[in-house]
Amino acid sequence: MEGTYEMMLLLEPTIAGKDWNKVVEHSSGLVTQHGGEVLASSKWGDRKLAYEIRGHKRGAYLLVYFKCNTEAVTKINRQAELSDIVLRHVIIRVEAVPPPEEQVAPAPVTASGERK
């Protein structure tokens, strides 16, 4: 049975900082090598962690949406656990890929200084 999944990856920050494209290719490879199809991915940036993970105080986040069968999810999960680049990850099933977040412009200011 095929489904759509969301995978949040916490990535090793030094590798992600040096070569982001390598990290994205590695993350996509986790999915495609098991017959999945990457639908969308977005960088969430580098953030300070609440506690150290494998000696790192910071981590880079990547959100990936993909489609695959349920048997492949187990394999993708295991491959992510064994990866040196992935510090933590979580995979959940979703109904559909949400639309990309849009930048909302602030309301224009009138001559009196009030927002419309």
Image (cartoon, rainbow, N blue to C red):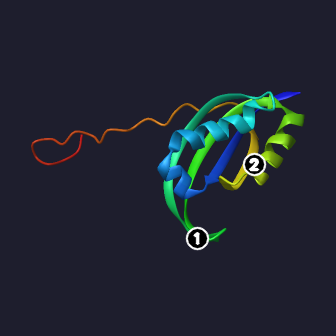
Q: Are marks 2 and 1 in contact (CB under 8 Å)?
A: no
Q: Which mark is residue 80?
A: 2
- Per the image, label 2 sits on a secondary structure element best described as helix
Question: How far separated are the C-alphas under marks 2 and 1?
Answer: 21 Å
Q: Is residue 71 left or right of residue 29?
A: right
Residue 43: image x %, image y %? Answer: 52, 43
Residue at left 58%, top 70%? Answer: 50
Report whether residue 5 is seen: no
Crowding at mark 1 (Cα within 10 Å: few <14, some 14-19, many 20+): few
Q: Is residue 32 left or right of residue 46?
A: right
Marks 2 and 1, the one that precedes in the sequence: 1
Report whether residue 111 is seen: yes
For badge 1, the amino acid type reads: Ala
Q: Nearer the viewer, residue 37 or 98?
A: 37
Residue 111: image x %, image y %? Answer: 9, 42
Q: Nearer the viewer, residue 92 or 69?
A: 69
Residue at left 65%, top 48%? Answer: 8
Question: Could you tell me which quadrant the N terminus lies in?
Answer: top right
Quadrant of the rendered image containing residue 36: top right
Tag count: 2
* Residue at the spot of label 1: 50
Residue at left 51%, top 44%? Answer: 20
